[in-house]
Image (spheres, rainbow, N blue to C red):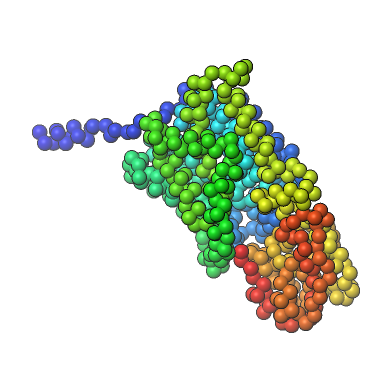
Amino acid sequence: MKSTARAHVRARPIPTPARPVPSPARPPRLGIAVIAAAAFGLELAVSGRYGYVRDELYFLAAGKHLAFGYVDQPALTPLIARASAALTGNTLVGIRLVPALGLAVLVVLTAAISRLLGAGRTGQVLAALAAATCGEYIAAMHELTTTMPDFVFWAVLLLLVTRLLVSQDRRWWIAIGGCAGVASEAKWNIAFLAVSLGAGFLVTDARRLLRSRYLLFGCLPAAILAVPDVAWQAAHGWPNLAVFRALQSEAWHNRATYWPAQVLFTGLALTPLWLAGIVWSLRRAQATIARPVVIGCLIAITLQFVLGGKPYYPGGAYAFLLAAGCVPAERWLAARGPLGRIRPAAAAAGVMVVSAAAFAPVALPVLPAAALRTVPLQKINYDLAESIGWTRQVALVAREYAALPPRLRRHATVLAGNYGEAGALDRYGPGYGLPQAYSGANSFWLWGPPPAGDTAAIAINVDPALLRRDFARVRLVATFRNGLGVSDDEQGAQIFFAAGLRMSWADAWPAFRDYS
């Protein structure tokens, strides 16, 4: 009898929490595809305006030095930069094809998450439109930086975790682990989301899904894919720690602007939507299954604030929050009467589009570059002003280099103070007859020092005290102006001529290192 009773207990089904059922209606593929295509087209339409941002110039240079890791990021973004340059003729528009596709992917992923959470056709279209009109996504997907793949992988991971929770099929852990591993090759930021989601599982009934061999199977590809970068960092003395310390110098400024930026970056029209997603996920019985994910998103957002991270670091979390918000929003709009001849859902979509249009001059280079002199939008979006004047700056360096006597020029190198300047010289310098440029900034330092026979230098934005320590003669020869009167990091950069190297470059080069 005891054996029978035990068998009966084992056979009893394990209760599972109520969960949203994916919308049974056929997904509005055409509507989502149109929104995704429009988002892609918008990005491409402005991709050739202004110029490269400094990070893109850096990644183009890094793509010529492929490695398992770099001082300030893993290997994926330089690899994308190299492939994009090779396939598209090394053009500005070409390098921005992948980011533009990234916005289209975010549109599709956000709509897919909303469907898993129970949104109908209208809710899924609204979710797609929310991603397409999110100011943070529009700005990040305009340029090839580590933020672009990071946002996409956050959204993919959130979709996979939602699929796991809805299906209760533990085999999804394998895909989740693979996604996290690939994401770790884009940006280390994915670790914050993974840890936060783990906490969300632990504090809810979803913790039972952690007791699975498939979770261990998922950890294996995640660990394997992360190994190359970790090994590279270890072999080079963990330079990423120096970068983290440098970023912490801005921690209090980041905290002061963090929460207003969450509203500004997503947009005034979308803030009520993602707030509704939080409330719905935490309070409604039919959203119980989504609770671990929303808790994880909230932890990730809060954690970046506590650590003093930049306000956009947890931006990928809004793919889930916006998708969740579209579930109650769809029902609320359906209960409202028409506004004249306008359906409530159409009115909501119009508000999203208008909000995105109002934010567009901040997110994208839609205004003439000269307008930034009187309307300093770069105070909000730093990259706007950091994408102008690069060819003018390289031309000025080339003028000073060409002015050197031929005998001296044969033994002169070109130095740059930051990786944007070094990247611009690497991208445009050969066209102006300049030799390879060198810099102590981040991974550029590892690609130095200059040739041993170079005893003179044309140096832009290099600390003159450092130059005077290493060279017998140093004089200011030019000051860069972007010609538009726009305030940015390069305006007023000084160009020096230095001659009479006092020591070998092998001895001088360590002092040039600047990991930041």
| 489 relative to 206, above or below | below
The furthest residue to the left: 1
- The answer to whether any part of residue 493 appears in the image is yes
State the residue at coordinates (70%, 76%). Answer: 466
- The answer to whether any part of residue 104 appears in the image is no
Q: Which of 484/48 is in front?
A: 484
Query: How many numbered circles does the render carry?
Result: 0
**In the rendered image, which quarter is residue 502 located in?**
bottom right
| Image quarter hosting the N terminus | top left
Q: Position of residue 457 (x, y in %)?
A: 79, 73
The furthest residue to the top: 341
Q: Which of 44/463 is in front?
A: 463
Answer with left or right where residue 257 lies relative to residue 210.
right
| 230 relative to 12, above or below | below
State the residue at coordinates (80%, 80%). Answer: 473
Q: Position of residue 431 (x, y in %)?
A: 83, 58
Q: Position of residue 244 (x, y in %)?
A: 55, 62
Answer with left or right where residue 470 lies relative to residue 2.
right
Q: Which of 248/448 is in front?
A: 248
State the residue at coordinates (32%, 33%). Answer: 16
**In the rendered image, which quarter is residue 124 located in?**
top right
State the residue at coordinates (74%, 74%). Answer: 464
Q: Which of 361/60 is in front?
A: 361
Q: Position of residue 514 (x, y in %)?
A: 64, 68
**In the rendered image, which quarter is residue 516 located in?**
bottom right
| 64 relative to 44, above or below | below
